[in-house]
Image (cartoon, rainbow, N blue to C red):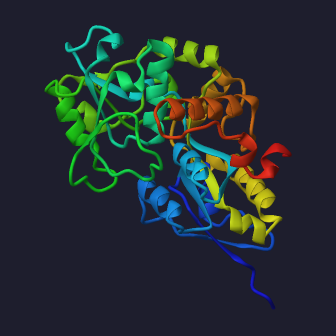
Amino acid sequence: MVDNPKITFSTNPNPRNRALIDGLIPIDGYDLEYVGDKYSAGEIHYLFVQGEFDLAEMSTATLMRAKEKGKRFLALPVFFQRGPRQRNIFYCEGKLTHPSELKGKQIGAFRYGATAVSWARGYLLDEHGIKTTDVGWFVSGKEVFIGNELPVKVERLDPPPPFGQEKPHLAKLVADGTLGAALVAGDSGYPGLFGGGVLPGVMGQVPGVKPLFEDTDEIIRYVKRTQIYPIIHIMTIKEETVEKYPDLAAKLIEAFREANRLAPKYFKNGDAVGYAKERDVLGYDPYACVLTNADKKSIQALNRYQIEQGLVQREIPLESLFVKEAFRM
């Protein structure tokens, strides 16, 4: 008897991938080996760029930069950590009266190249006319992958703290006025859309530090008007694995679709209602593992933002980012 090929995958558990992690969804002809239980999200992204794993959850912005530099990865239409980034922009109450006052100030970020940070900068650019070069930048954490020389000077905390421990320093600098604002990762999905989630708890532990944009109605209007719904994490596979196993990509997409269908068994209290409200606002299921026109528009917006931010140099065709099956299923 010939053993099935082993496909290693790494991802942080969430309701929409748990059935795969728990081995409830077999993939015909393959053995899926989960190796992500000891890594933070940042570590998974970092290790995958360094060549670990066949399949991994990856920062969408990092994928674009890696592709531009010739690294051989392809995305599946499998999206985690979605939603507007307005609530992830923090300031100190009383130190700003309007977002335009950020021009000329220094803004902090846990990573300059983090996808959430790229989306937040894009929002400030499109909605408030604040260019990346209009402010100074301070970074508290370790970068995952930046392939280009940046168009701005970035001051960095040296040495950076371990992955996942980058935010407390930023909160203190926002509170004392050293930073005009800080961009960090936080709630996504329906809590990021409607509020009421936990946000980065450490930011709220420092007196006066709070989200700069909290108006739920305005956030919903922005999403409906722009049809942009940020994609933070995306499942990505090595091109060499796709080439070696030509039927694997389609089977993986269908497996993640089944995992999404089984997600309710892992939901916490209120999740089903919250995700239903999210779908109602968007008019589609943003986790259905289908590359919609809205998804394409969102990815193209992130590409545009990264060009403005000096993280990539050109538009990257969608066809070069995704497995071909993403356009057929």
Q: Is residue 119 left or right of residue 184?
A: right
Give the percent coordinates (x, y) of residue 273: 59, 30
Give the percent coordinates (x, y) of residue 74: 68, 54
Residue drawn at 32 percent across, 24 percent down: 135
Residue drawn at 34 percent across, 19 percent down: 212
Residue drawn at 45 percent across, 53 percent down: 41
Q: Is residue 82 visible?
A: yes
Query: On the image, which quarter does residue 283 sit in?
Result: top right
- Is 44 drawn above or below residue 115 in the view shown? below
Image quarter where the N terminus lies is bottom right
- Is 15 drawn above or below residue 133 in the view shown? below
Give the residue furthest to the top: 97
Q: Is residue 143 left or right of residue 29?
A: left
Give the residue furthest to the right: 328
Question: Residue 200 versus residue 7: which sits nearer the camera?
Answer: 7
Question: Residue 105 versus residue 276: which sits nearer the camera?
Answer: 105
Give the percent coordinates (x, y) of residue 30: 74, 73
Query: On the image, which quarter does residue 175 sit in?
Result: top left
Question: Residue 273 versus residue 311: which sits nearer the camera?
Answer: 311
- Is 316 drawn above or below residue 274 in the view shown? below
Q: Is residue 300 left or right of residue 29?
A: left
Q: How many marks?
A: 0
Q: Is residue 15 visible?
A: no
Give the residue furthest to the left: 176
